[in-house]
Amino acid sequence: MSTDSSILKLISDGNKYADSLVAYKRRNTIPVEVGNIFIGSDFPIRVQSMTTVDTMDTQGSIDQSIKMIDAGCEIVRITAPSVKEAQNLENIRKGLRLKGYQTPLVADIHFTPNAAELAARIVEKVRINPGNYADKKRFEVIEYTDLSYQSELERIRDKFLPLVKICKEYGTAMRIGTNHGSLSDRILSRYGDTPLGMVESALEFLRICEDENYFNIVLSMKSSNTQVMVEAYRLLSKKLEEGKFKAYPLHLGVTEAGEGEDGRIKSAVGIGTLLEDGLGDTIRVSLTEDPELEIPVAQEMVRRLQNRSLKSSPIISFKGKTDHFDSPIHPFYYERRQSNEILNFGGKQVPRVISDFSTISDLSMDDLKSIGHFYLPEPDKWAMNDLGADYIFTGDQQVNFMLPNGLRQIQSSSVWMSHQENSIYPQFSWDEWCVSTTKHPTANFIKLNAASLIGDLGILDKLKLDKNVIIILHSFNEHKMPEIRRAFFDLMDHDILVPVIIHLEYEEITDEQLQIYAPTDAGALLIDGLGDGIMISSSGVKNTHKLRNSISFGTLQASRVRISKTEYISCPSCGRTLFDLQETTAKIRKVTDHLKGIKIGIMGCIVNGPGEMADADYGYVGTGKDKIALYKGQNVIKKSVPAHLAVDELIQLIKDHGDWKDAPEN
């Protein structure tokens, strides 16, 4: 994102937004009562999800809620787009209570104050979007004077105040949930499409609540863009403290994360980064899957943080102090760490993927299929797909065939010394590097433990003088991301511009855990502009090279630092969805997943769709039963397309705008 004057002012005011930047600690918040549970820093991080069946299907809603609750869901959200759905929440709630389920219900409101006011009398919590609760989106740029802007705020107050009073009277909690894709024209006109605009959108409504002494509030700043999401939550935390607001709990979520591995990785990058910062009191993982499948993913994110404060050591600031935080990175906008370009690492190069094959004793050509390189015997040549790894690390092993041109080899220095091939690059330990008199003329990799690097002036001074060096940085600490980040800070403080590979090592880890842990640890660094490459090593029973490779590329894509495949911004479905979202997403993915770099939004309904897919190049949005609208960016291109023709029409739309290419033959 570009740095505007508002963001630069924030930087000059200091970077602190969370206490965990000194040592891991959850941000202190007030308690918020939601039915029979509390949300806040004195309580566990709550896991929640949202039903996907039609809210008017009472029994279906009850049955699905029970599945979610039995899976571990602590708060159930149900859409209430109009008064009739809001009214039916009473029947759903009664049905659950009769079956012995006391789990709090949340009414999800869009556009309709009447529905919110009714729902607030029935369920334990309502969620409103400040971008559309009192405004209709016209995509207009309006020039406001201070007087006319104040007049708009008074109009909002008149519309919002009845709901605040009802919530206060009935003891109903509220989430003020900003969505990046549905900011009002008023906010966009004054603040632009920025994290600051997202924060101010919520604060407008929050001021009204506090004026009425209503504080039973949770806040959220959701986006499908993980960089925007992380920056907005951090900025919200800072602005709440600066503005002398109460410390409200935060609800974390990445909107429209998608399905399968991509959805899990994207959620881990966004939610995991903030949890590592100590931000977040309740989370929802939005997957285009059955809602009960979201729960284990969220639970694993929360479980990983248990006892974290006991495992973490103080995060030394880049000035060498632990009693305050003074960071060389900019938490409110993206700026990549400056580094020298060596080989194709660092500088303006995209972060590279290194695949660890050091445990394979007899590497074959077939083994490279798992990392996107395919040997074709008939023409005797190699082919590579979009997820082709850039390097392999072979450790002490030899490779007995010629590698494809798109793949380079890194080898343990002790083995490299015996042949000193210029086409292979050595990896040294620090001790080996210090005593070696033989080094590669172009590039040398040094594996460094982050704990050893931090504060060691001997290492830092030598690195500043060494040329043709690339660091492979790792940590044995369970609190590994902050320790690696601390090492980056020391490099930056000493103006050391060597490229750095983030090396993540895990022992006895399941595939499901790897899909969460690695994107959290690497994504949290990449979003802050740290890292010129990624390598994942693991000793899990089933962890494969293919899995580690796909997680590496997926993490880079979810962090917005390297786009290597088509991105799908697909909503998790809800009672408003007008077609089979999972089936349609799979169908669209099947015919478009070769369109590298294109973002396609697949939205179940018109209520949220156009706003939440604001980041997409093309959009597929349900507008009525078996009717689809197709978008180019924010603009509707085709309306009321029959559902059975819509995928073909989407392909034609992409072709018409010059973004289509035929899929490569298998």
Image (cartoon, rainbow, N blue to C red):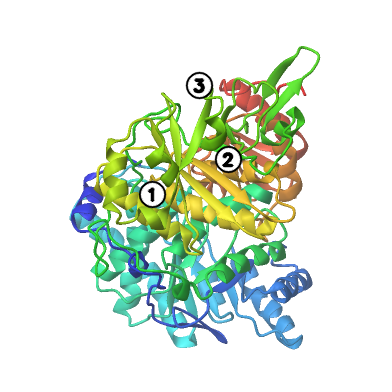
Secondary element at tag 1 = loop
Secondary element at tag 3 = loop
Q: State the residue at coordinates (65%, 23%).
A: 403
Of callouts 1 and 2, the N-terminal one:
1
Residue 12 vs residue 433: left or right? left
Query: Real-space Cα distance between discs 1 and 3?
Result: 34 Å
Quadrant where the C terminus sits is top right
Residue 407 vs residue 277: left or right? right
Image quadrant where residue 517 sits: bottom right
Query: Real-space Cα distance between discs 1 and 2?
Result: 17 Å
Q: State the residue at coordinates (32%, 54%).
A: 196
Q: Residues within 10 Å of mark 2 (few under 14, many from 20)?
A: many
Residue that badge 1 annotates: 528
Of callouts 1 and 3, the N-terminal one:
3
Q: Residues within 10 Å of mark 3 (few under 14, many from 20)?
A: few
Q: Nearer the viewer, residue 81 or 322?
A: 322
Residue 369 vs residue 415: left or right? right
Residue that badge 2 annotates: 553
Secondary element at tag 2 = helix
Quadrant where the N terminus sits is top left
Circle 2 or circle 3, nearest the eye: 3
Query: Real-space Cα distance between discs 2 and 3?
Result: 27 Å
Q: Amino acid at mark 1?
A: Asp
Q: Nearer the viewer, residue 554 or 143?
A: 554
Q: Amino acid at mark 2?
A: Phe
User: Can you give x and y, in whole percent of width and height, for residue 113 in the image?
Assistant: 48, 67
Residue that badge 3 annotates: 422
Is residue 181 something one can see in this rendering? Answer: no
Q: Residues within 10 Å of mark 1 (few under 14, many from 20)?
A: many
